[in-house]
Amino acid sequence: ADTATRPRERPRPRSRYFLSCVCERYDAPSTVDMASSALMKRMSRSRAAARMVSAPFASSVDASAACVGASAHARAWSSSASSNDASALKEVIRARLPGVNARLKAIKQAHGEKSLGEVTVNMAMGGMRGITAMLYETSLLDAEEGIRFRGYSIPELREALPKAAGGDEPLPEGIMWLMLTGEIPSAEQVKMLSEELVRRADVPQCVHDVLEALPKNTHPMTQLSCALLALQPESKFAKAYQAGVHKTTYWEYAFEDSMDIIAKLPAVCSIIYRRTFKGGELVAADKTLDWAGNFAHMMGHDSEAVKELMRLYMTIHVDHEGGNVSAHTTHLVGSALSDPYLSLVAGLNGLAGPLHGLANQEVLKWLNEARAQVGDDVTKEQLTEFVWATLKSGRVVPGYGHGVLRKTDPRYTCQREFALKHLPDDPMFKLVGKLFEVVPDVLTATGKVKNPWPNVDAHSGVLLQYYGITEENFYTVLFGASRAIGVLSQLTLSRASGYPIERPKSVTSAWIEDKFGKVE
């Protein structure tokens, strides 16, 4: 809004140093005259692009703010580029890129024409399940092993990733580093990343204003989308693109936006939590804490155990390969070169859907229903009858089964281990454990279920409830904050390797009949 009221400035002469940097960035001859000419051409293109800027959600003030002069864009680009050098993580990514991209090029040259598998009509009509059609580096889901993050299983990461002082659970900053680099970070590297996130964590007043303008009963996920869109005018990626930066540098600005978003998420989410459920009284950040520990603190939960739970929760929900709704949507929207703010909001709106991010709420409702009907001192026989009654009523058993997995979700297992250590006598935990002994046999007996084993949602809500985070409508916000780390890491890598815009082919039902035969 400030830039919208500021008079358009004429491009100022650039210093010889700045122009020589332009030459170096674009591999142009290092003469000031040629660099000046290249810069002015880029600024001219930026003016034309600025006149065309439009966003469906923008007010007239937003639109005018997007159309600031090319000189302002160039200054923002120059300032951003010079400040970015302080990030150790960024320099590790930069050093790895030549080798990463050379390998991808070699893979494409060697195997580009080879088939990844057959696509059937059932796949096309069944939500594209089983179609292998994406390159997504941060995680891989194996039907038998479960999720691996950059090749590491959850048990391996709980052991290898750095932890908070005196803690046993991995710090989410560590898995963020791993996803972006493919390397397990040292404790010192994680400390530097934590400090970098603290420096970026302040939330501008406009976010508070936007949230206060919403009705009090607005769903927390809607509030999260609105808050992130309020931050979008600060997108370094959007400004750099309009300034005409070279496409090989897109990843740098995607990285900067991703860092800014992830840094601000604990504060943004906590504002939503406190405003919606705690009367609006906010808790100031503790800048000595790690990302997840401070998240719990700002929500108003200060025990060391709940901070440990938050570290574990934020680590294990971070990614689940690229085909799920939130990851795929973020990837798809980002492939159009929408900035990370817009891309993440699109993914979060997918996460808000009942079939994706609300499953742990459904589990809690079902568990409470079970306790109401059979009590806490329940036998396996009584639980078996209850599970059969659920199925015969036409409902599914929530928290069991998975579209890809064919064994117990390792994310369930690590949460069970956490509960055995911290809350072994909790009645809800005991019920979850008894169901683990009953449900797989019942589902197998139906003959219709490929995976009768528990998934991550079978356990997460119980842990949150135990530590006083009882507001079920907020659970998807926590899920989204964790998932942001994974999808924004991949978004950065996608820009670094120049992934193209995604555009699969669709067909009509008539086309299928024309190809394979009419049906009665």
Image (cartoon, rainbow, N blue to C red):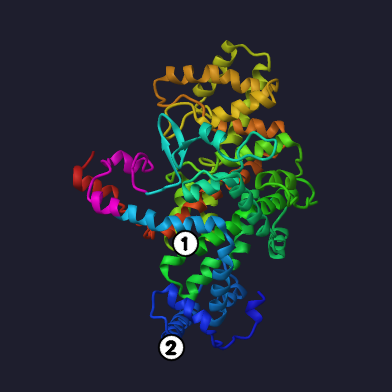
Q: Is residue 215 left or right of residue 324?
A: right
Q: Where is residue 407 in the image (x, y as percent from the top left)?
A: 45, 26
Stretch of the chain drawn in magenta: 106-134
Dot 2: within a 10 Å radius of its alpha carbon, few (fewer than 14), some, or many (20 or more) residues? few
Magenta-colored segment: predominant secondary structure:
loop
Badge 2 amino acid:
Asp
Residue located 58% across and 12% down the image: 380
Determine the CA span between mark 1 and mark 2.
28 Å
Q: In which quarter of the image is residue 146?
A: top left
Task: Decide whether residue 176 is among the magenta residues.
Answer: no
Q: Where is residue 137 in the image (x, y as percent from the top left)?
A: 42, 47
Q: Quadrant of residue 354?
A: top right
Task: Decide whether residue 107 is among the magenta residues.
Answer: yes
Q: Where is residue 244 in the image (x, y as percent from the top left)?
A: 46, 75
Dot 1: within a 10 Å radius of its alpha carbon, few (fewer than 14), some, or many (20 or more) residues? many
Residue 264 showing in the rendered view: no
Closer mark to the observer between disc 1 and disc 2: 2
- Label number found at residue 33: 2
Q: Name the residue under label 1.
A: 251
Task: Name which of mark 1 and mark 2 comes first in the sequence.
Answer: 2
Badge 1 amino acid:
Trp
Residue located 40% across and 34% down the image: 142
